[in-house]
Every structure is written in C-alpha cells, then in structure tokens.
Image: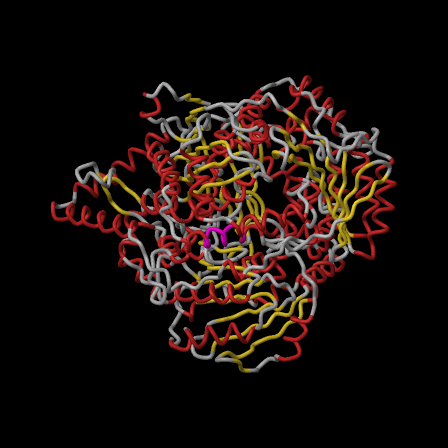
Amino acid sequence: MRLLTRSGRLLGTYWKSRLYGTAAKDVRKVLKEGDQLHGYTVKKVTEVPELYLTAIALEHDITGAQHLHTASDDDNNTFGLAFRTTPVDNTGVPHILEHTTLCGSDKFPVRDPFFKMLSRSLATFMNAFTAYDWTMYPFSSQNPQDFQNLLSVYLDAVFRPTLRELDFKQEGWRLEPEDPSNPSSPLTFKGVVYNEMKGVFSSSQAIFQQVAHNKLQPSHTYGVVSGGDPAYIPDLTWQQLKEFHATHYHPSNSRFFTYGSFPLENHLEYINTNYLQHFSQIPVNTSVPAEPRWKQPQETSITCAPDPMAADPDKQTSVCVSYLLNDITDNEESFTMSVICTLLVDGETAPFYKSLLEANIGSDYSPVIGYGGHTKDATFSVGLQGIHEKDTNRVRQIIADTFDKVIQEGFDQKRIDALLHSIELALKHQTSNFGLGLGVSVISHWIHDSDPSSHLQVNKRVEQFKQKLKDNPRFLQEKVKQYFKNNPHNLTLSMTPDSNYEVKRQEAEKAKLNSLVSALTEQDRQVIIKQTEELLNKQNAAEDLSCLPTLRVSDLNKNIKREKVETTSLGGVPVWYSKQPTNEVVYMTLLSNMADLPSHLYPYVPLFCNVITKMGAGPYDYKSLSEEMQLYTGGLSSGLTVDNHHTEPHAVQQGIMFSSHCLERNLDKMAELWTHIFTSPDLKDLNRLTTLINMAASDMASSLSNSGHSYAMKHSASGLSPAAQLSETFSGVTQVTTMKKIAESGDHTELVQHLQEIGKYILSKKNMRVMVNATPQFMDTVLGKMEHFLSGIPGSPEGGATKLVNNPSFVVSSSHTQFELPFSVNYMSKSVPGVIYTHPDYARLRILSNLLSRKFLHREIREKGGAYGSGAMCSSGVFSFFSYRDPHSIQTLDVFETAGQWAADGKFTDQDIDEAKLGIFQQVDKPVAPGDRGSLVFINSITDDMRQAMRDQLFAVSRTDITTVANKYLLNKPGAQGVSFLGPANETVQADKTWTIIKE
C-alpha cells in the first residue's frame, strides 16, 4: 500500500530526465492525432523536450480506456495500470482488493502469482499502490521478454482475478483460532491488511495525517480511510469486495501508462487482443465531486498514545492548520500553488521555518506539512509537533501573523530564483527508475480527467509563472491572501497524548471481536474451523507453477556491466572520476575516513552529519548558506557509510560522505560552499543547534513505528560484527536513545565541543578521497577545478583511500532484547554470524537468503501468520531474519528456527534455486544512474573484477552449497546469535529471565 508522504513537495515528484533520442523521435514521426492503432485512436502527440520524451495520448475505441505512452530512449521500461477507486466507508475495500487481485487469476490460478513472479523476473520494480482515490499496479523492467511476462500476469490479475473467499480472508481479515492447530483456542482477528493497518496506526503521526485528511474533505471519499481502519475492516464482506471490483476494475474506469524504448504498438496489440476487446463500455460513476466549501473555519481535536521516546514528556502535543486550495486539474494554478507552498515552508529562509521552528517551542513541523497535490482539491498544512498543550493557540496566532507578513512583504526574489533553479536542475538530474516516478506523478492529476500530456510540460508552467510575476509584482501575495487569509475552508487539528489510549484501543478491538464472536452459532464456528483448515491446507499445498512465465538463469548475461572509473591524485588526494552522460550535471562526493576518530566521539557523529551543512559557514549564516545551496546546487549533504571490509576479517570501512551535484556552470560556486564548510563551519549558534537537535530527535523517534524491522535487525546484529556494532551506534535504537538524551539536555556547551572535535578529524584532507562524475567533454575542466578546490582544504593527505578501522579483539556475543513500545504489532529479528564479501560462502548465503524469503518465510509469516512482511538478509558479516508489522512474536522466532531446518533438509526444488538466483540478480542488475556509476569501487573498494567474480559464484551455487551453508551457519554453528524486537509488553518474554527488556 502507498501511504502518502509526510510532506508534499514541489510538483509532487521531482522529475529526472533521460536522453532525448531515437525512441521519442521515431514515435513523433510515425504517429499523429487521429491515427488508429490496434483498437485505439491517437488523441494527442506532444513533444516534451525538457523530459526528453514524446507523449502519445490514446483512447480505446470500444471501452474508452485511456492510455498514455511516453516514448524515451530509456531501456528501463515502465508499465502502470490505474483505476479510480473511491471508497465511501472505512473498511479498506480498495486496499484489500489490491491485495486479493494479486492472489490468482483465470490464466494464472496459482496461489499468489504476484509474489511468485518476484522470483521469476528481473523487474527493477514490482508493486501495487492504494492511494486516497486510485489504485495502481506498476512494474519496470529492462528485459523485453520479462516485460511481456509481467504484463501478462498484471493484466490477468486485475481484469480476471479469481477473488477466492479464502484469499480475501487471508489478505483482508478473518476470525480464526489463535492457535490454528487447536480449534478450541479463542478466536481472534487475523489478516495481512488488518495487521498492516494496525501497524500504520501504531504511529501517532500516521493518525494525525489521516484525521487531517478526513476532516478537511469530509463529504465524499476523502472522508474515509482508503487503506482501512482496523476498527471497521471486519465489516467488509467477500461479496462487497467482488462488487467493488466489478464497478471499479473495468477498462472504462482505467488509465494505462507506458514509458521507455519498447514499441508502443506491441503494448497496444497485446492489451487489446487479450483483454480490452472482450469488454464493452460501461457508465463510470467513480468521479470525485468538488468538496463543498465551508463558510467558516472548523476545529477538531484527537488523542494518541504517549511517545516514550519524546525528549520532553510534557511537550507531546501537535497542532496544524490545513487549507483546501484549488482543483489540481488546473495545471497552471496547481504549479503556482505548489511554488507558493514550497516558498512558505521549505528551507531555512522560509517564512514558517523562521516563525515556527526557530521559536523552539516545538520539535518539528507538524506531521502533515506543506503542499498536498494528491487529492482532487489540493491542500496546504502548516503547524508544529512536540509543543506544550498550552501553546496551541500561540502556534495558531503565529501562523496567522506569518501569513499577514507574507501578504505585506512578499517573497524575496532570490528565493524564487533558487526554487526555479531547483526545477531546472531536477529536470536534468537522472535517477535509476525515472519512468515509475513519472507515472505515479501523472496519475494523481490524470485520474480526475485532466490532460496528462499538459501535466508533463514543466517548462510551459515555468514560463507562465514567470510571465505572471512580470505582469503583476504582487501576484504571489494576492494568491496567499486568496487561499489563506480569505479562505474560510480551513481546519485546525490538535492532538494530545492520552495515557489510556492504547488500553482504550485494545478494549475497542476486544469489544468488536466479542460482538462478532457472541453472534456466532455453533454452525458458524464449525464453518470458521473448516475454513481455517482449508486455508492452512491451501497455504501448505505444493503447486504446479508451470503456468507462470519466467526468465531462466541461462537467459542472463554472464558478465557484469562494467563501470569505467579512472583514478588520479590531485594535491596528494586520491580522486576517482567517471565520464558519464550526466546531462550537464556534475556529481561530487568527498569521503573522509574516521579511522583516527576517538571512540568517545562516535555517538555524536550522526548529529555532526546532520548539522554540518545546516549551521552556516564562512561569510554565510545558516539562512544565507541554505539559500546559496538552493540557488546553485542540488543541495549539500553528509552521511555515514559503514561496512565490513570485503577481505580483511574484523576490519571496517567507514567514513563520512559529503555529497552534492550542480549544473556545470555552477561548479565553482558549489566548490566554494564546500570550502567554507570545511574551513570555517559555524557550530556555536546554540539556538540554531537546538532547533536541529529537536527536529532530528523527533524524526528518529517517529521512525521507530515505521521502520521497526530495520531497528530490530541492527540491534540483533550488533554483537556479531564490528561493522554491525558501529551501525547500531550510528543509526540503531542506540542512536535514537542518544538523540533523546541530547534533546533532553538544556545545556549544549559540551556537545558543541564534541562536534568541533569531530570536525578537526573529519573536515580535513588527511584521510580524504574524492569522486566526480561528469560529461566527457567537461571532465578536464572538473578535474582542474577540483585541484584548486582541494588545495584550499586543510590537512595533509595520508592515504584516505585505504585506511581501515581494525578490531582484531572483537568477540561476538549473544543477546535477547525486547524494546517495549506502545505498538499494536511487533517487529522481530534474529541474526547469526555470517561471512565477508570475498568468502566463498557469501554468494551461497545470498542465494539462501532469497530462497528462504520467497519460498518459506513468506508462506509461514505472511500468509499463515498475517504479518505484513518478512524475509532473510545476507550482509557482509551477518545473516538476519526479520518480520514487519507482525501480530506474533515468539511464534515468529520459532519460524526463523524452522526456516534453517527446512533449508538444511533440502525441501526445495531446482526451480526454487533458479528463482532465488533470479531474485538476487534482480538486485544486482538494477540500473545505475550516471551520477552513481563507480560508487561501489569508490566507497567499498569493490572492483569490477570482484563484482564479476561474485557474479560467477552466484551462477555456480548448487543445491549442495545451499544445504551445506544452511547447516553450517543456521543450525550447527555454535556460538552467538542476536534476537531483538520492538513491540508491546510480552508475557512470555517477561517470564523468561534470559531476555533483557528495555522500557524507554
């Protein structure tokens, strides 16, 4: 399921361009308006040079299905099929339908063909999304046959699903004995979506976002929870699900999107011949009406569970004001409002950043913030979280005063120019899955009958915007007055903690369960027991999967795609450089080794990375530095990299990476900004530092409920390898706790000293290495400018390319730890020692991890157990199991144990091994954007020859190899293991003295 993001960003998705070559030109030559092709009529052909593509809008003659093809020379082709799905209740019918359609179809009647295709494909992306008012089924692939295979499975899934009752119960909800093997055990709720949404609403931020959305537009589909409210999901019946499919999953209510270099006519011929020509057109009654505008503002308040990770227990209130804006199908108005909303909240010089965040009365912006272009009428929200309840009215007054100030003073032209520069740079900056982002961005507008081709024409919007500013200098101020000052359709939402919140939720769930169970007759109970047995048998049954298409390992290229990287030395600093088609963008990464950093400073390194580019430097305070970054670069960022060395046991490759990109014309300016940061950073502004600390602590605390499996894995692995130990320190629960303590501290004087001390070690070329990617014709210029730039950085180079942190005395240790948190689901993990990258068993363990994930854990933990996700992961030095949004805990740990035995016993087929290999090659062969090519050798010292050796080893993995490593590492290897999980209080754990329970 796709839950909409915390903050709407300009244009929804920053589009990244591709080479404008023969695919786009050929389509433009061949097709014109009115042409007919395989049952379709061409409605419009539009050149979009800023995105390096040609857009062709078509309509199916019989059904009225709409199709947008965006022809590009990108070989990573994308397909997406979207339906307007507009629920009118909280049962989550579109979300549960999204899951259930992928559980089998007429042509592919096997159990869960979607997940099985994950192992039979080289897709660069496969998923399905449920948004507020649409559902989309997208995939991407670079392989023509793979693309065709996936197209056949996706189309059959949505248009001819079996929609079996047992699949509905497995994916949606069901009543089932707590212990399926004991029919007399108490009945309880189970179901994948049911548990997924319980996990979603374990986050107070998700609750806040959902209520703000529902209450601002209450009259129709936006007034309900499209993903499903666990309190109402059990009201949905199988019959209602099938009826929703019949009325919403019809070609007349569809939008097809294709992108890339594969021929359009092949797509159309297949879709029409196999599906659309067998349908007739039907009336579509799924449109979303305009929200009736309020005559006066409204207010509402809600409660949530207290956050045990909050820095200040007395400051846990959130408040925001949300406004209903324009119809998003008006592309020109939508662009204007997205620009205005971005100017209002994004960046250190934004009016609301200055008035709300710098006041330090809250920890961060409210959970819903900025422009929202994902509903028929756009929205804007602004507010604060982490405030005292008594400050609610103060925040509201600040918001009103800020709008008044903007109306009076307007926006600085330099900020407008910087924002327009960001758009220009974003159009040139390339990503590895551009087609997917393009399709998702288009759908939100197109689903409401706007012209998708017009939505793509970013340059046209920019020129219109510039002209309006030229014609009317007060244009933006008038819009702010119209949509905010004089707009009565606004909602003030506040949320405060209630210590009894989780108790009340559990009581309500129990009452719902009791009401259903008490109404059951003995015959009903027998039906439930019978269905439980049938579902279990279905989940355990061996299947004939021969109907599913698949690539074969023998179809794969035996050789890697080599990434040409050259090396040189500039002023003694090792430099890697790669000449790439980067669309006149220069990518630069500086990596500063931490080998000499004293260990007592390690806990503060993540904060150093967070603040070093945000505190001001040289002649710039933090506001002007932020403005300069946006005006001339794509941003300056810093972050940590930590991994076991590929060859030396107990040696760790680690460092801080400073990354940025810019247009070629701005390279001097980007280098100048980095020079100031490295030579004269300002770390003494305590008010600014406090703001950043509060924001960082708030973000980390809220991430626990969204990424609990990641935190559990890091902690369970932390005693097993030096790199894993560092990773836990830098980005695990340990770091969340560290940031909480820092935020609680009122005096940051000592902290500033720690940050300055880190800077002395890191902001130096002593242990630095550099990588740049640029166009071939500009590379000589880049290297010349880099040499000048590096000459201004302090320190004397001492071989930063090879220096490692060695810890030969590291000893693995076992742990069993629960982090007791007020969640309604669990995040489980178990880790055991693994091997490093060049070890002969590493490739075998990688294949084993994929085999276990797809062929065992998915069935046992997701299908049977009802968890939203699960898997096994092999990383350098560690092998880990995990589950995500899991209703079980100890039972899941038992499954992890059983998984090892299953693999050691060889209870899998040769086809399973091939599919596991395909799953790994799917990851290995994902496209790499030009700006990222060469990063593996630069960051991890893994050369092309090493990558080729790994590829050869992956191809060679045999059945005996898998059973051998399963026995060796999962069953018979004595010694340490780590078990960790995040979740609510657990009686079994409390009764077992071998567990450590941490209550934050």
**Residue drawn at x 35%, y 54% as measured from the top left:** 93
The residue nearer to you, when weighing 373 against 940, is 940
Residue 79 against residue 353 in the figure, above or below: below
Query: Which residue lies most toward the front here?
Result: 960
Q: Which residues are magenta?
A: 914-921
What is the quadrant of residue 221 in the picture? bottom left
Label count reads: 0
Left/right placement of residue 560 relative to residue 673 reads left
The residue nearer to you, when weighing 373 against 143, is 143
**Residue drawn at x 39%, y 66% as measured from the top left:** 156
Q: Position of residue 238 (x, y in %)?
A: 27, 56
Q: Position of residue 577 (x, y in %)?
A: 77, 47
Magenta part, dominant SS:
helix
Determine if the magenta segment contains residue 919: yes
Q: Position of residue 255 (x, y in %)?
A: 48, 66
What is the quadrant of residue 611 in the picture? top right
Q: Is residue 157 visible?
A: yes
Q: Position of residue 723 (x, y in %)?
A: 59, 30
